[in-house]
Each structure stands twice: as C-alpha cells, then as structure tokens.
Image (cartoon, helix red, strand yellow):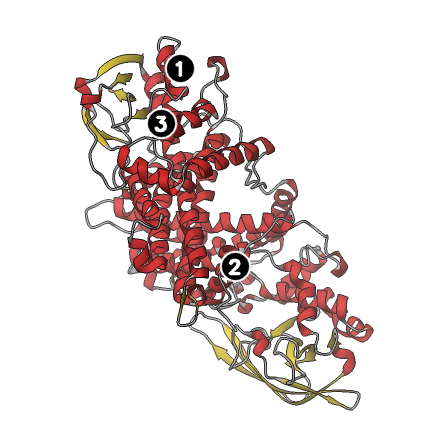
C-alpha cells in the first residue's frame, strides 16, 4: 500500500506549486477575469513543460502518465490559474498520437504556449454547435465527428466570448464555420478520443479535489483569525463541524480519483464505473466545500475582496461544461449494472498502490479456510456484530490457531503487520463474525502485560490468553459518555487495597466476562485527566451488580453498579493517577477503522433484493435507472469509506504524519452507513421491513446497527471536533 508520490513527482508538484503561487496572485486573477487569458502565465506554464506531460517521448514530449497530469491538476485546483490546462494537455496528447506529424506545426504551437487548445466534449455530429471550455481563448479544438477525430482551427469570430458563471472564456462554437483537419478515422481513433474524455473526467476530478482542499484551508485560516463574541469563530462547532464534514468529502474524492486511475492500470473490470463515480463525487464535494467555506466568511465571502468567491464559481463551472454531474452517477450505474462499455486511457505507471500485500492476502486465505472448517451452522446462527455474537468454543479455537491477538506476540499472537491485521478484520466480517470480545481481550491483555503486577499476569492474563476468560470495558458513565476523563466512579485507599464505588454505563459484555477494565477517579484536586487510575475488577466480586440494557439493535449492553467493592492494590494497572498514560499502552491497536465492511454487506443485500422485487414499470427493480443510481451512491460511499480506512492504516504502518485520518475514517463511514442503510431500506420496501432470513434480515439489521455506529467509540460530534483540530488546524472546541 502506498499513498506517496515519487521523488520526481514531488519535485514536479513543488515546481508547479511555486509557479502558481507566483503567478496566480489576487491581482493577476482579477485582471485575467476581466481581460481573459494571462498570456505571460500561460507561456510560463508551457516553459515548465506542462503541455508536454502527455505527449509521447517519440514526439519530443515527456511521455508521462495520467497520474503525473493529475499531480499538475491538483495544483491547478489549488490556485485556479486561468486557461484550459487539462484540455490543452489532452489535446496535445491527441495531436501527437493521431496527427502523425501532419499537424506538427500546430502541436508545437500548443505545447510552446503560443496557441491555446481545448476539447469538444460531445460528438460534433450530434452537436455541431456546442459550448467549449475556454472556447473564447481556444484557437485549436480537437473533437469527434462520427467516425472521425478532427482538429478544428477556430477563427476568432467563430468563438465569441460570453459572460459566464466564472468568467472562464466560455464560448459556444459553431464548428461548421471552423476549418477542420481530419486527424484519423475509424474505431481506433474514436476509441482513443473517447478514452481521452474519460481521462478529462479524472483530471477535472483531481482539480476539483485540490480546489475543495484549498477552499477549506482558506476558511479555516479565516476562522482562526475572525472573532465574534470575544473568541475565534473556529471554536464554534457550527463553524468547525461542517468544515470537517466537507474535508472528509474532499479527501475521499481525491482518493476515489486515484483509485480510478489505479483500477485502469490494473485492468479492473469496474474501472469505467469508477471513473464516472470519481467525476460525480468530486463535482459534488468541491461544490459543498466551496459553499461551506464561503459561509464561514459570512458576508465578507460575498464580496470580491476575498478570493473565496472564485472557488465557489469555479467549483461549478469546471464540471458543468460536460452537463449535469448527476448524469455521471447514472452513467456509473449503466457501466456497473448494465455492462455499458467505455474506452479507457493508457494511464502509464503510477506509484499509488491500494493492494494490502502478500502477508495480508495469506492471512485472508488462512482465515477463510479456518472458518469454513470450524464454523458450524449452529455457530453461524449465533453470529452478531455485537457481544451477542460471542461464541466461546470458537473463541478458544481461534486462540489455539493463533488467530486472535494477531498483532501482539507477547500475548501468544503472531506479530503480524497492520495491513494483515486490517485484512483479518475484514475477513472475519465477511463471514459475519465480528467479535468485540477478542479486540477487548487483546487491549486488556496488553495493558496487563505492560503495566500489571505479577499477580495480575498469573491470575488474569493467563486466563485471557488461553481463552478461558474475557474482559469488558468500564469507561462510560451515566453522566459522562464520550468524555471518559469525566469519570466519577471513585477508588479510595482501603488498607492494603482499594474500595470502588460508582456506576458504569454501556458495560457491554459484562454479563459474559469475568473481569472489567475500569477507569476510576482517585484524585479530585487535580485536572480531571490527571486524577484517574486504571484497575482490573472481578465482575463476580461482592458488591458488583449487573443490570441488562437492551437496545433496538438486537444487542444487550449493561449498567454495572459497584458498591463498596474491595480489591487488592496488586490489581491496579500503572501508577496512581496515571490512568491516561496506562491507557496509551494499547494505542497501537488503533487502526483508523471504518464501517466499510458492513456498508458493502448492506449494499449487497440491497442488490439481492432489487433482483427479486418487481418494478412498477415491469422487469426487476435492479434494471431501473433510479435503483441503479441509489445503489451506486451507496457503492461510492462504501468505496470512499474503505479508502479513508486504507489511508489511516497506511499512515500508521509507515509512521507518516496522521492529521486526523483515523477520526475521518470512523466518522465519515458511520454517517454514510446510516444514510445509505436508510435509503436502501426505502428502496427495497416492503421486503426490507421484514426480518426474513437472508438479505431482508441483514438490511433490516443494518438500518438499526448503523444508528449505534455514530455513537459507540466516540460520537460523530466528538470525531468532527478532532478532525477540525488535527486536520484543519482549528481551535479546540471542547473543554
């Protein structure tokens, strides 16, 4: 797995970034908005080799791939230089390959910055008069006309500039009045042109992602400076949380574009659908991010004194030249479910890799084989995503096979890497076996191993690592949910030990476990996070009462009461008042996980029902445009969630800076999980209302399950605050 650019690509990115920083000043952007193309800047961009990127080396170009062009376009999105940069890069590509030297003079003028080129995005045979991006500046336009690919030499009088949304040289060109040169005829040529249009979608997608990121950066910087009611507006969650939501949209959009390029390179049969999804997603994400950024500026954002309005306008104008972006979602549905074919570009080499590696694949194979061999139908019926799915006999078998505690050799595990650990989790999920007991056992085991007394290791750790016992977590309290540091359950010295009094809420698994890992308050005279101590408490000790709490998600959790519970000091973990440090001993188990797996499972269940349900207009529901669009939207959300999870895993594994990647993966996926479960429940009604065994039951359960994912492990609001602080640099919004 890799999310890094090559050294050469990073150098190229920095070169373009410096150039745009120097040339795309507010003054020059506004002048270009009035006067048209900044010819000096355009020529400078040509000197950097921008228009040679996709020209083959045999034609004196750089011979680079789609991903390299995407690196350029992300910087284009960041600074909004005027001119059809993506279109000119791709037009030069077509002139070189199809022109076969016959239009060498025109190609030289384009790559040298002396002429501006663009693309006709629609078949000229069908639309002889059509709007062209930057058409008023484009002396050369490459387009398809039926079975031919043509170069049009467009006189100035044929490309009259019109006032438009973003003052980007929009022109409606009547191609019957332009001088045409046939570059090539036949299916090979037209397929290459159509593939170039697909590449344009990718490049515009990346540009929109860069635009969205920069708009959010500008908004965040403003929110750190602007004060209202005596404090920076970035401290208000009404400001910071929507920006955090938009950041997840924008970042996942860039990853979707990268994934589309990777899919083309790998020959993925679904690559064409991924291109369409990327274009649709980024058009939406950039629009949301830019509009929310402007909202952050308030009334000032409406003025032309601030650059943010340029981003709002360009976020719409870039994709709209091709038509309604929602058409790309329809197109994705046709490509995925209807097997509609599309010509795709030769993207060349790229460094980005989403494959999880040999160790991970081997782990998946081993777990698949184990589950097939050891899981009985009776066991499978007991599986559940919560503690209700705990199967003691299977738990022990997994420990014997060293398939629990996978990343922790000190607990008898294998010490596998993060990618293999993530793959194992996904494989268990595939089999319907989501076992929180195992994860908690590993966490508690590590804490005991590293901070526990010899007595704890002998009495408790040995039982946990053998599978004889499991533990639950005692963090949340009735008056302190996500804020675990607000714990009020008291532990006070009592002879040679401690007395514990208090109440813990949501002690899931306490009815099944022998022990609880408990966070207690031992000092009320210091800051709340400094007066905490960790203990292991036997749940069968006198004074412990377990009261069931049932949820509408078909799971049981518990309230646990502790009344004069006495334990020896040897059952303390770590130093007195050092509970926060003790908790950090198991932090390597954090993986930036998401709910991508249940999201995909929910989607597959909905697809199955759509194949069964009759459509009102005849045929099956899966054949309809609306159903396909809704299914593809859910598929896009699940894919984005998985990519954010991959990025968080990679950042942890490779020791990369991780500005909120984990919270982004968790928050985004849980929000999308609920949104999609709700929509797919509606799509497949009335079957989805039932708990009939199979797809209907799974979809029904997913809808109920999804509500909890936004709460457990920290609410979405808590994670939004973390994203705002870590990824956007906004002020802290919590006490």
Front-most of residues 362 and 400:
362
The reply, left or right, for residue 697 in relation to residue 651 is left
* Structural distance between the alpha carbons of marks 2 and 3: 44 Å
Q: Can you say whether 269 is above or below 175 in the image?
A: below
Question: Which one is earlier in the sequence, the residue at label 3 or at label 1?
Answer: 3
Q: Nearer the viewer, mark 3 or mark 1?
A: 3
Question: Which one is earlier in the sequence, the residue at label 2 or at label 3?
Answer: 3
Of all residues, the one furthest to the top in this rendering is: 102
Element type at mark 3: helix
- Where does residue 580 sit, x and y in percent of width and height? 66, 71
Q: Which residue lies at the image location 54% right of the left edge and 56% below the top edge?
A: 660
Q: Which residue is mark 1?
A: 108
Q: Can you say whether 312 is above or below 238 in the image?
A: above
- Where does residue 203 sit, x and y in percent of width and height? 40, 34
Q: Which residue is mark 3?
A: 39
The reply, left or right, for residue 680 in relation to residue 708 is left
Decide: few, some or many residues near mark 2? Use Cα within 10 Å; few <14, some 14-19, many ≥20.
many
- Where does residue 629 sit, x and y in percent of width and height? 30, 46
Element type at mark 2: helix
Q: Can you say whether 107 is above or below 203 in the image?
A: above
Decide: few, some or many residues near mark 3? Use Cα within 10 Å; few <14, some 14-19, many ≥20.
some
Q: Which residue is mark 2?
A: 663
* Structural distance between the alpha carbons of marks 3 and 1: 16 Å
């Amino acid at each position: 797995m890799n999310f890094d650019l090559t050294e050469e690509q990073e150098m190229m990115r920095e070169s373009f970034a410096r150039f745009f920083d120097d040339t795309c000043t507010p003054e020059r952007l506004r002048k270009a908005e009035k006067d048209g193309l900044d010819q000096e800047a355009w020529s400078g961009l040509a000197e950097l080799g921008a228009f040679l990127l996709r020209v083959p080396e045999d034609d004196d170009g750089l011979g680079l791939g789609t991903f390299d062009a995407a690196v350029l376009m992300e910087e284009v999105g960041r600074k909004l230089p005027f001119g059809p940069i993506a279109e000119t890069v791709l037009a030069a590509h077509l002139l070189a390959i199809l022109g076969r030297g016959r239009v060498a003079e025109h190609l030289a003028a384009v790559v040298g910055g002396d002429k501006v080129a663009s693309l006709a995005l629609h078949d000229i045979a069908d639309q002889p008069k059509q709007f062209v991006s930057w058409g008023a500046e484009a002396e050369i336009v490459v387009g398809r006309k039926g079975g031919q690919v043509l170069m049009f030499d467009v006189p100035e009088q044929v490309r009259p500039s019109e006032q438009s949304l973003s003052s980007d040289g929009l022109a409606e060109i009547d191609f019957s009045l332009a001088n045409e040169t046939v570059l090539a005829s036949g299916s090979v040529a037209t397929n290459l042109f159509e593939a170039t249009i697909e590449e344009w979608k990718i490049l515009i997608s990346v540009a929109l992602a860069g635009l969205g990121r920069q708009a959010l950066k500008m908004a965040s910087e403003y929110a750190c400076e602007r004060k209202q009611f005596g404090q920076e507006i970035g401290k208000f969650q009404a400001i910071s949380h929507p920006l955090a939501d938009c950041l997840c949209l924008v970042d996942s959009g860039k990853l979707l574009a990268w994934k589309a390029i990777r899919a083309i390179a790998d020959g993925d049969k679904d690559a064409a659908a991924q291109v369409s999804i990327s274009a649709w997603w980024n058009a939406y994400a950039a629009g949301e991010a830019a509009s929310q950024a402007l909202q952050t500026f308030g009334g000032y954002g409406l003025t032309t004194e601030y650059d943010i309005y340029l981003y709002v306008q360009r976020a719409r104008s870039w994709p709209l030249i091709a038509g309604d972006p929602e058409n790309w979602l329809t197109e994705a549905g046709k490509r995925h479910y209807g097997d509609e074919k599309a010509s795709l570009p030769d993207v060349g080499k790229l460094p980005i890799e989403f494959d999880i590696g040999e160790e991970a694949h081997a782990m998946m194979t081993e777990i698949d084989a184990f589950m097939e061999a050891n899981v009985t139908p009776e066991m499978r019926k007991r599986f559940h995503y919560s503690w209700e799915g705990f199967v003691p006999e299977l738990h022990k078998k997994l420990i014997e096979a060293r398939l629990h505690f996978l990343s922790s050799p000190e607990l008898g595990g294998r010490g596998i890497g993060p990618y293999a650990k993530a793959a194992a989790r996904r494989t268990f999920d595939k089999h319907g076996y989501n076992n929180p007991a195992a994860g908690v056992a590993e966490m508690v085991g590590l804490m005991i191993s590293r901070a526990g007394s010899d007595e704890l290791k002998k009495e408790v750790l040995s039982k946990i690592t053998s599978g004889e016992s499991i533990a639950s977590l005692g963090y949340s309290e009735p008056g302190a949910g996500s804020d675990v540091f607000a714990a009020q359950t008291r532990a006070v010295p009592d002879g040679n030990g401690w007395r514990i009094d208090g109440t813990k809420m949501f002690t899931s698994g306490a009815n099944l476990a022998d022990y609880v890992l408990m966070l207690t308050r031992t000092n009320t005279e210091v800051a709340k996070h400094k007066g905490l101590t960790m203990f292991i408490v036997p749940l069968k000790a006198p004074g412990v009462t377990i009261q069931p709490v049932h949820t509408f998600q078909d799971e049981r959790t518990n309230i646990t009461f502790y009344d004069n519970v006495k334990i020896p000091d040897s059952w303390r973990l770590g130093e007195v008042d050092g509970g926060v440090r003790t908790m950090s001993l198991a932090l390597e188990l954090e993986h930036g996980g998401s709910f991508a797996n249940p999201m995909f499972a929910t989607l597959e269940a909905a697809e199955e029902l759509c194949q069964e349900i009759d459509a009102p207009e005849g045929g099956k529901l899966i054949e309809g445009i609306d159903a396909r669009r809704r299914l593809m939207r859910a598929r896009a959300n699940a894919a984005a969630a998985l990519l954010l999870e991959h990025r968080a895993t990679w950042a942890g594994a490779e020791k990369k800076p991780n500005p909120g990647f984990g919270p982004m993966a968790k928050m985004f996926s849980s929000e999308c999980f609920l949104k999609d479960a709700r929509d797919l429940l509606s799509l497949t009604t009335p079957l989805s209302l039932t708990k009939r065994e199979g797809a209907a039951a799974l979809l029904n359960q997913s809808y109920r399950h999804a509500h909890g994912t936004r709460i457990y492990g920290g609410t979405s609001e808590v994670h939004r605050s973390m994203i705002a602080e870590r990824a956007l640099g906004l002020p802290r919004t919590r006490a």
